Amino acid sequence: MLVALVLLGARAGAVEFDAVFKDRVLPLLAKHCHECHSHAAKKSKNGLVLDSATAILTGGEAGPAIVPGDPEKSLLLKAVRHTNPDLQMPPKGKAKLSEAEIAVLVEWVKQVQPLKEAAGRAGLDWWSLKPLVRPAVPSGAVSGQRSAVSNPIDTFIAAKLREKKLSPSPEADARTLIRRLHFDLIGLPPSPAEVEAFAGEFQIGNRQWAIGKLADRLLASPRHGERWARHWLDTIHFADTHGFEHDIFRTNAWRYRDYVISALNRDVPWQRFIREQLAADVFYPAEPQLTAALGFLGAGPLDTSTQSTAPRTFDYMDRDDLVTQTMSAFASTTAHCARCHAHKFDPIPQEDYYALQAVFAGITKSDVPFDEAAETGLQRRHWQGLVAAADAKNSAVLLTPENEPLVTRWEGVHGKTAGTEWLSLALDSFLSSDGSTLKREADGSVSAGGTRPERDTYTVTATTTFTSVTALRLEVLRDEKLPMKGPGRQDNGNLHLSEVEVRLLGAGSTNATRLKVKRATADFDQAGWTIQHALDGNEKTAWGIHPRVGESHLAVFEFESPVKLAAGARLVVALKQLHGGGHLIGRFRLSATDSPNANSETAPPLVAAGLKLSCEQRTAEQRLAIAAHALRQHAQAELAKLPAPAQVFAVKAGMEPKPVHVLKRGDIAKPGQRAEPGALSALADLPARFVGTKREADRRVALADWLADPLNPLTWRSAANRVWHFHFGRGLCDTPSDFGRMGSLPSHPELLDWLACELRDSGGSLKHLHRLIVTSAAYRQSSKVEELKSGRVEGGGQPTSRAPFNSSLLHPVNPSTPSASDPDNRLLWRMNRSRLDAESFRDAVLAVSGRLDLTLGGPGAQHFQLSKGPQATPKVDYTPFDWDSPGAGRRSIYRVVWRGIADPFMEALDFPDAALLQPTRPFSASALQALTLFNNDFVLRHSEHFAARVEQLGTDTPSRVKAAVRLAFQRAATPEEVRAMTAYADQHGLRALGRVLFNSNEFLFIN
Amino acid sequence: MSARRDFLWRIGGGLGGLAMADLFAREAFGDDAAKPRPEFNGGLHHPAKVKRVIQLFMTGGVSQMDTYDYKPALAKLHGQKLGPTEKPEGFTGMPGTMMKSPFEFRQHGQSGRWVSSVFPEQAKLVDELAFLMAMTSKTNVHGPATYMMNSGMLLPGFPCLGAWVSYGLGRLTDNLPQFVVLPDARGLPYNQNGPFSAGFLPAVHQGTILNAGAPELVPDLFAREKFRFASRAADRDGLALLDQLNRAHAKTNAGDSRLDARIASYELAAKMQLSAPEAFDLAKETEVTRKAYGLENKVTEDFGRRCLLARRLIERGTRFVQVWSGPQGAVNNWDNHGNIPNELPPMAASVDQPIATLLRDLKSRGLLADTLVVWTTEFGRTPFAQGNVGRDHNGGTFVTWLAGAGIKPGVSVGQSDEWGYQAAEGKTYCYDLHATILHLMGIDHERLTVRHSGLDRRLTDVHGAVVKEVLL
């Protein structure tokens, strides 16, 4: 596979680039082949590109295009000679190569040298893969800045602008700045009072100080996490439903959304953010509330065919989605492009891709319980540990001074009743209804063998020496011969006892009397399969003991009143096991007692025997058994008292990883070698394979460590670039989830590296980066295009700022103006203007109309009505929603996002398809968007609320209009605006005016 | 896409200007490759024969051997246990015994095409249709198969055919949405709105869903009546005031095409408010037409209404209309697991007359000269019985037909094996169907690409060949 790494190899020395190739071979390949096989044409038909010797030697899906030194065996020559009717190139309709041209190829192939192994690193020569080294901050002043440069960001920006002879734009005014920072950092507009206060500080004081203070206030606000969580949720395609064919509501997905909000508010270090989301269960077991972070792995769509009709295909596709999501989000790498073949453009062999699939090979998405309070979790773990120790008879844990009082106390309460004397029944006969072979064992028990029917009923007839029986005990016994050592016969060691019926048969009688059982207890009940089910008269329910297989269990049935046994009387016990699937008892023993205290704590014999003795008389084994029994019961009682666990839609941990194979051409029917868990082999400083990670969780841990490593250049560049992207509307690399060759090159690679180092070396603090960025001069620039700021007037002397949008294309402009030499503003000679995203628009409308509900967290707000659909997916109708209902004014981050049936209102403002990883939000403008903003119930109802609020803020229409503009635009209205709006409001009302303001570009855009 | 994007960056000087393609498709595009060209009849890469498309999508998987794929061998093998002995992925049960079609087949037209008795009306038009007799899916599961037939991918998140066409060719009219989806009144198809998604293309290219049975065909075309203040007069004056505010704002924030795009969007919205109600108003049609589409028959009413609406939209410049038969779920669609003799005929009857009428109507109005009609489904069904008389999912082979502009009538391509279980020859995938449709619209399917997440994505992924045999 090494050779695949050199696909784009261009490093000198990797391959012999002789003159013949450059001067003679390449031109004729360009002429005949490059249309379909070159990077220039972005075409690689059948995986083949023919624009470098390396690429030719690497070949495509059919194998290497040439065999060095052997033209006759070279596919390329066969193809151009048309010797094989199935392989004729160029294809039909295109000119065949001339004999002279073919001769050139033959000569070259004879001379060409084989690929050298060392060439394998050539594809690594790429900006994003290079080690992250803190660049020196450029020296030199930043023009336009009065004070000495304090922010390194600006020296990087200034250096590039100087190269292009450009200068930065002036600082924006106070109102623009506070509006910009508010929407950027918390996603809400400032109130008029906040604008006024800031403007005051900004005008009279130290501007740097005023901005810094504002940034600190906003970054400390809980609203900040609500705003920035949405960016991350977009990036990883989080939603509240499965999506896909059966679009089922994940009622517990919101826990992850709340986790992200909280993590960003707490400024959780980025490396820890990675570890929490991939493997909080292993990294931070003492903080069970972090289980919610594992919702990261449950974020994407899920086809429930995984669990039913097409498990292989959808398991594979689900893992593919996890690889894509994880590597895009954290490493900005398109590893998923190496599913069918080595990555065409980046140094990612297919083996790497399947190594990543193997990381997620043990993952099953489902609701996962967890404790919200660390203290509860601590207790739960403690008591669960004690139960486990009791099961394992672990004396080191059980026999401690700490536990001793618990055992003593238990004995004081239960010791007497636990000492019941049990005698095994003397068996007359035992029958199987469905063909199990029942056999008497030496210890008085009965074992079941032979064929294993689906269902069975064992009927035992027996006698006892007691003349009065108060209770019957059923022991189901561990047996080495049974699956999982029993006590059941099912493959998993379990059994299901549907009903127990006990009858009394007098001597010589054929009429048995059914005996009433008043209470049953068992030493262990499988969840949902309690011993009560063996008495409920319902044959569909049963008692089970999973997962505590491989050990004996017992159940005690107390009769309603003591049963008098005359001479020769027999007990007939029927054990109905009707669940199916061979859930049958593998070995059992029946005993009886005459003790009036047999209300049974179901103490095992060893415990019962020990309890009859004084402490000093007990054997070590008895002491341990009593401690185990007492502590298990105590622990189970304590566990029952704990608050019910919360749930999050995430991954079920601890599953057995499934084998993952490298698939030829990505075809599930063509498995190749077994894939070992790992990540990218392109980063030399980090392990490419996670050796020895057998357990599912270990693999996630290894990947998290791989990603979070300070030496992983992708991670830090990725995170720093995303932060920049959301502040400026465009990343320094403007393909934030693709740092490969199909992505863009960064505009300021040194600045990106500097920011990445700053993030890494500051301990992973995003807030540190936010503060650096929003206080920079680059961020504080005006967004306006000032064509004339260079002081020169172009040809006709007409100011082009008055021209229509595409003026720069229709009319030649002075090349020295920024909009001519850098029209994309890649060098940031001004700030980028941005349109509010769907959430910010909605939240801004709520805020200015006084309807914003700032409740933090919790289950999502449903802005729709649900009704039964034709199948598992309900009907989701957004139109009848009442915008005055409780919770309707909560921030948009708290919406339930229905993946398959998105809110049309949010979609109109470019809320993305949540089936898709969306590192950037697009912009669109359309008639349907305009109609939605103009007529949707949400906007109209809040126009009414807005009007009611404005009504109170003025005494006449003009004063109310002024208040409306101040609220909506955060500025004073111009006299012209007051005139026009007053006229409109007088005729159609303030509500109609609110609607117009909410639709205006000034409301929707941030300068 | 990069050239186009760069261009839009240039004129936009701002964020994600790409989406303005919708509004500026006919403005001066800097990028020739992506520009619909008049000399190509609006095509991108070569002359277009088709300007608009109506796609009829039968949800659930139409049983090919009970409709268009006549398999006499099944009569001989009926009742024999011949199928796979293990349950294939995506089958919902173990394959049962071979099952002959319960319906009578007869040959029709000059082409002598076999059609079962469930499609008496379409049978009369077989000489107008071109059949793909051996279409194949990569899956036997509804959700991914439905995605495949729409977006070419098994997974969600990719743009569908209608979105690609909208993105590539732009609008024919300002007055109506350009890609319209008409779902069954009983519910959405599998994957909900997923099959109409614009994926990573700008949101303007996603299907606009019209609920033909609902009181508000397009939500938000007008304000609801309860908002009295949003009167027509307030609308009119409000739009004027908005325009005034926006123009003043654009003046002080010059050089940003997005601001102009939004100004224009309100002008287009006003046009749509004027035009759409007329387009949607089926009462404008004659009694004869309404009856021919089956609007007066309960069985055909819903599908017929949507076929008629599709024709009215196409006629008025909508580019792409998708009409769905059947919602997702166990009933009221073509997913006839339980009982082919009982479940298939009512579905067939609900679409047969409306489809035949649609084809005749388009032809008589001359619309078929530049309109393509495609009839399809997500996969076929098994020749083996499920239970006694049902059939299970089968991606192995199924039938699609095309009719209209650029299509060679009366031909067929490919055939299934003797049982109708797998494609035997002339196998076609969604990629080939999509490549053919794009080809007819003047688009080279390999050259309409958008870079997304590390790849130059196209509708046909890395596959697809134009099915030349069905072309004139």
Image: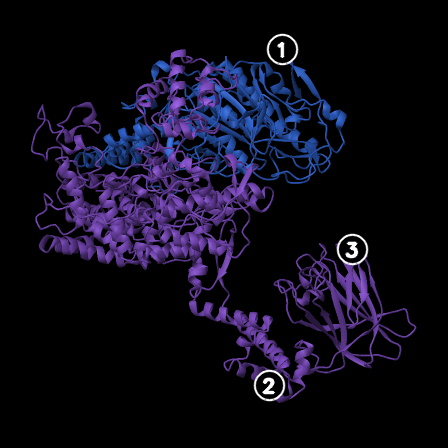
Chain colours: A purple, B blue
- Report the mark closest to the observer, 3 or 2: 3
Q: Position of residue A655 (x, y in %)?
A: 54, 55
Give the residue number, with chain letter if any, for mark 2: A412
Please tell me if label 3 and label 1 are on a single chain: no
In which chain is the residue bearing label 1? B
Decide if residue A28 is on the left or right side of residue B8.
right
Q: Which mark is residue A234?
A: none
User: Cα distance, mark 2 to mark 1?
Assistant: 98 Å
CB of mark 3 within 8 Å of CB of mark 2?
no
Q: Position of residue A723 (x, y in %)?
A: 29, 48
Q: Secondary structure at mark 3?
A: loop
Please tell me if label 2 and label 1 are on a single chain: no
Please tell me if label 3 and label 2 are on a single chain: yes
Looking at the rendered structure, the kind of residue marked 1 is Gln
Residue neighbourhood size for the residue with mark 3, other residues' Cα within 10 Å, grouped as few (<14), some (14–19), many (≥20)? few
The answer to which of A413 and A614 lies nearer the viewer is A614
Residue found at x 68% / y 81%: A608
Res. A21 image quadrant: top left
Vertically, is B276 above or below A521? Answer: above
The answer to which of A337 and B472 lies nearer the viewer is A337
Residue found at x 51% / y 21%: B373
Q: Which mark is residue A451?
A: 3
User: Cα distance, mark 3 to mark 1?
Assistant: 65 Å
- Report the mark closest to the observer, 2 or 1: 2
Q: Report the quarter where the N terminus of chain A lies.
A: top left
Looking at the rendered structure, the kind of residue marked 2 is Gly
Decide if residue A199 is on the left or right side of residue A937.
left
